[in-house]
Image: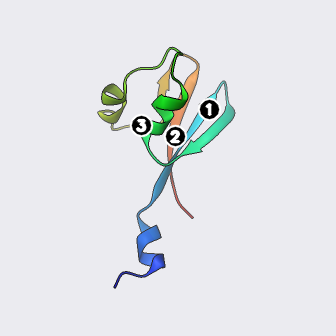
Amino acid sequence: MVTYKEQQKNKHYFVLLEKSVPLGTFGSLKKVVEFLDGKDCPSYWTLVRKTEYPIEFAEYQVYKVKHH
């Protein structure tokens, strides 16, 4: 059985910033795109292909951070 500590070891979150002001922390990029519905945001499929963080578009930045 996998322990809680092992489950959390590789976990990460996505932090959304607007002009350096944090808007929220999300468990997936899909949730970030849903949160920005109606704003100038690329599609989920465009963001998921990005390999370098932070992802920047319009006045937003998305950072990928490890769970501690």
Is residue 44 left or right of 19 when viewed as pictured?
A: left
Residue 51 image position (x, y, % from top left): 33, 38
- In the image, 47: left or right of 15? left
Q: Which residue is mark 2?
A: 63
Dot 1: what SS? strand
Label whose residue precedes the other's in the sequence (3 or 2) = 3
Query: Few, some or many C-alpha atoms within 10 Å of disc 3 (few <14, some 14-19, many ≥20)?
Result: some
Quarter placement of the N terminus: bottom left
Gap in Å between the C-alphas at discs 1 and 3? Answer: 16 Å
Q: Disc number at residue 27?
A: none
Q: Which residue is mark 1?
A: 17
Say which of marks 3 and 2 sits in front: 3
Where is mark 3, residue-wise? 30
Is residue 20 or residue 48 the one in the foreground?
A: 48
Residue 10 position (above or below residue 23): below
Q: Are marks 2 and 1 in contact (CB under 8 Å)?
A: yes
SS assignment at label 2: strand
Alpha carbons under labels 2 and 1: distance apart: 8 Å
Q: Amino acid at mark 1?
A: Leu
Q: CA distance from mark 3 to mark 2?
A: 14 Å
x 29%, y 33%: residue: 49
Crowding near pointer 1: few (<14 within 10 Å), some, many (20+)? some
Q: Residue at x 57, y 64 (%)?
A: 68
- Residue 46 horizontal/vertical position (percent): 32, 26
**In the image, residue 15 above or below residue 50:** below
Could you tell me if the residues under marks 3 and 2 are in contact, i.e. CB atoms within 8 Å? no
